[in-house]
Image: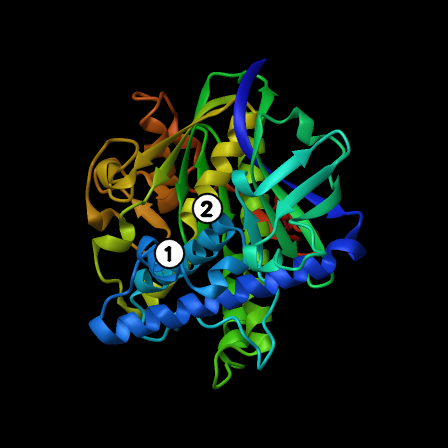
Amino acid sequence: MVNRVVTRTLKASIHNHSQVSDDLDSHGFAASKLWNVGRWTIQRVWDAIGHIPDTDDLCSYLKTHERYADLHSQSSQRVLQELGEAFVSWYEQDDPDANPPGYRKHGDDHPRSTVTWKNQGFKLDTQYNRVRLSKGTNHKKSRYAADYILCEYTLQTAEQTLDAVENVQTVRAVWTGEQWDLHFVCKMRVETADATGENTAGVDLGICNTAAVSVGDETLLYPGNALKEDAHYFRHEEYGTEGENGPSNHAAWARRKKARRQNHFLHALSKDIVQQCADRGVETIAVGHPKNIRDDEDWGRHGNKRLHDWAFETLLSHIEYKAEERGIDVERVDEAGVKTSKTCCECGTEATSNRVERGLYVCENCELVANSDLNAAENMRATVTPNPSQDRSNGCLAQPAVRLFDKSTGRVRPQEQVACKA
């Protein structure tokens, strides 16, 4: 067994919700107001000098603003960091149809935004399962008001306790639509088993096929149909109900729903990939990292949109931490250096013409026939196993085992095989 320090988010319910809900509401509303002040400030600077201020500039501009003091200083900084990150994400899309981050306001009502307390803004009492959340200066002015919000919590998982973690980095109050929950972001020390085998696996991440996995004599393909269906449906719901003054309630619901479903899909997919590798005695996984693909060239309006929606960094990080718990090493491989999509994994011939059509790779030199994504995955595997001895005659690269995401169960399962009738 090996001790590893990992980052985890532990969710908790609030016992004394009726006693603290008003204070949490006021801080959630304050976070939305500060977001809107920051949004207005960015627009004003943008219109004046054609420049979008970054997070540091924004914090400097607003540090003396009245709304900044509604929250603990670190909580206010985090709100403005989120706004800055949202603008960076929007700007990188380079999509004329994409709208910049909007205001958090529906008519005269401000929604309850997530509030984050960093290490100086909270104090934990793990013996009695309580946490003190510091109030903003403006919420301490009443002579009868406490300087903090005292929440009594119960973790939603029975296997872990906060007194067993290395440290708690941040505490977030998250509005679920019906109540407030607490999210504790922790550094935890976990015991993981050493990898039981010496095999290696290669993983190629993509858009049509979310992942392709090669373990040498076995290959697995994970189509992204469910993810694309959700993206198409909820994007239509979002843009079809856009209001004149920003996103409508239904548009905001569609955006949140799409994000939740995508996050669940990526968690289920990464869990299955790591499980399949562990079952096959894999010790090291080499994952292609297309880190510069958005900068390589202009893929056209539709292609650039698909690239922006491609959450390869999120999937890669999920694979990494789930593999870490199994004692499996993960190596990120720069796809640009390996040229996985053009190179034959059997003879090493590099030719763009070998990709005769979408999904099919035929080598003109050695006549290897393979699924193009699995050919790339096997090239990834070769980066950690330089001379993999493998008999290609079994056709595993051309006819992989397909594993599909089942929307009815929320899990990944093998594709059903239909027997042909005589």
Given residues 147 and 359, the one toward you in this image is 147
- Is 337 drawn above or below residue 55 in the view shown? above
- SS state under label 1: helix
Q: Amino acid at mark 1?
A: Cys
Given residues 381 and 104, the one toward you in this image is 104
Reading the image, the residue beneath label 1 is 59
Q: Amino acid at mark 2?
A: Thr
Choose the circle earlier in sequence order: 2 or 1.
1
| Image point (22%, 42%), residue name | 364
Residue 15 seen from this side: yes
Measured in 3D between alpha carbons, the distance from the residue under mark 2 to the one under mark 1, in whole angstroms, is: 27 Å
- SS state under label 2: helix
Reading the image, the residue beneath label 2 is 314
**On-image quarter of the N terminus:** top right
Residue 323 lies, in percent from the top left, at 52, 29
Residue 280 lies, in percent from the top left, at 54, 25
**Residues packed near mark 1 inside 10 Å, few (<14), some (14 to 19) or many (20 plus):** many
Q: How is this picture coloured?
A: rainbow
Residue 258 lies, in percent from the top left, at 55, 63
- Is 349 drawn above or below residue 352 in the view shown? above
Given residues 220 and 309, the one toward you in this image is 309
Given residues 27 and 180, the one toward you in this image is 27
**Residues packed near mark 2 inside 10 Å, few (<14), some (14 to 19) or many (20 plus):** some
Relative horizontal placement of residue 325, taking residue 77 as reference (left or right): right
Relative horizontal placement of residue 308, taking residue 18 as reference (left or right): left
Residue 101 seen from this side: no
